Amino acid sequence: MYRSSGVACALVLVFSACGNDSSSGGEVPAWEGSEPTAPTPAGDAPGAPVDTDPAAPGASDPTPPNGEAPATNEGNVPVGGLSPGDDAPGGDAPNDEGDGSDDPDTVPPSDDSPVVPPITPPNPGEVLAFPGAQGFGRFSVGARGRDVVHVTNLNDSGAGSLRDAISQANRTVVFDVGGVIHLESRLVFKNNQTIAGQTAPGGGITLYGDGTSFSAANNTIVRYVRFRMGRIGESEKDTITMANGHDVIWDHCSLSWGRDGTFDLNVESGEQLYNLTLQDSIVSQGLQTHSTGGLVATTGTSIIRSLYIDNNSRNPKARGTLQFVNNVVYNWVVSGYILGDTAGRSDGAMVGNYFIPGPETNGGTLDSPTPQYNLFASGNFYDSNKNGTLDGRLLGQGDFGSVTWQTTPSVPFPDVPALTAQEAFEYVSAHAGASIFRDAVDDYVVSELASLGQRGATISDETSLGLPNVVGNLPSAAAPADVDRDGMADAWERANGLDPADVNDRNGDRNGDGWTNLEEYINSLAR
């Protein structure tokens, strides 16, 4: 399932390569005594979620003055967690999120059987969404072979706007302009769309002012887009949300400032949600008082080489089937990665991740585990000393509490080449997010990460960052000439033996590799 990318300490299905993962490496185990499970509410079927979260600390005082973890949950039971100075990474109390939420978290109903993602093995020669696409969403076809439309202005709506471009399915969207699109209402994406943010000239494209929905947007590809919701967005909504559908991949995206979740994949009752990937991305600064990275409750999601930073809780909250590989989680407040927190079965794989507390961290790193969470984990590290140096320790079985420990994955997961946790930290620091041009927001949080425990803070209002134009300035540039409006630059067409006056050659496949000529062009712009 996981193969090393040529590193000295391979992360494979045996533990001996990096030392024995079955103990906490000489540290005091995070969990002792009884192993409580989340109760099932009266009247709910087995597997129904429990969300009795304690009240969130405010943005002005995210850490209680006594430096201790938040005192109680709604049942007035002390909340476990990582207290300042402790070197055990979690707390064994359920519902340890500290966000005061009562959102309708769901997870597909299950008994004791694995929730197996409804994926079909790829046919011989099946084409990836783009070179380097990985995880459950890697075979999204986007708008391959369909129409192309140009975004020609930064208006919220009307002809030439992004909102108009995504109003119909089966479209590749290219950008003739770069800059900030100020959203006056939420954007709703449709099926079989390819959103090629890498085509935006200058500093790329930023969406600011409200959130987005990908529900039912099956087979959609999104690359190099910044999604920044903000305080001016709709209350109690997510930066990105998806409640049903399949085969979507977000690559090199920057997500921030959600007013509920920032990246929320939460299957609605009676629907399916599967084959999703978030890779090489940043999930940052969910806004207090409900500051969360987000809930991931699906039957097949991969989160790969991404950064969760400055979120009060849910980094992420994992339910259903989640593959979590080579990510970095930094400066959570009351809870880091939430291991199910439900009576329903979940299946997870956690490989080569780095968990690094920041100045505000006072809650559990690996939080709210239950025996219903079936976990395969290897090569994960934890650096708690906040000394400005990356010098953490290996997390062992004892650190994951009452999960059901699996020595091999409990369900099939896609093959993902795995870096070591240390290499993942370096890679994410350099490449995560819309990184062709890193804007001021991403620079801000990545510089916090580089402090390794000495800087970092959650926020309640994005204007508090003091950045110009709230989201920072983006350099402008002209788009390359495209006379036939087929989405491919004329110079690239000439260099590759195509006709700059033939609009139909975009859907040809000049080299027979399965990607259309238009896909070859937009993929050539990614880096």
Image (cartoon, grey):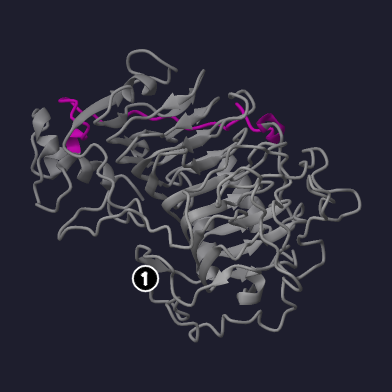
Q: Disc count in the image?
A: 1
The percent position of residue 295, horizontal first and vertical second, equals 55, 46
Q: Is residue 463 above or below residue 269?
A: above
The percent position of residue 41, horizontal first and vertical second, equals 66, 46
Q: Nearer the viewer, residue 159 or 451?
A: 159
| Image position of 51 (left or right of 254) | right
- Which portion, as a residue range, is magenta? 462-491
State the quadrant of the N terminus. Answer: bottom left
| Image position of 298 (left or right of 126) | right
Q: Can you see residue 352?
A: no
> Helix, strand or loop at disc 1?
loop
Magenta stretch prevailing secondary structure? loop
Q: Magenta includes 489?
A: yes
Identity of the residue furthest to the right in this view: 66
| Image position of 128 (left or right of 35) | left
Q: Magenta includes 113?
A: no
Q: Can you see residue 524?
A: yes
Q: Which residue is mark 1?
A: 1
What residue do we see at 25% from left, 53% from top?
128
The percent position of residue 346, horizontal first and vertical second, equals 51, 58
| Amino acid bearing label 1 | Met
| Image position of 387 (left or right of 102) | right
Q: Residues within 10 Å of mark 1 (few under 14, many from 20)?
A: some
What residue do we see at 36% from left, 65% from top?
412
Q: Nearer the viewer, residue 319 or 424?
A: 319
Q: Is residue 127 above or below residue 372?
A: above
Identity of the residue furthest to the top in this view: 158
Q: Nearer the viewer, residue 259 or 436?
A: 259
Query: Which quadrant of the figure has residue 329?
Result: bottom right
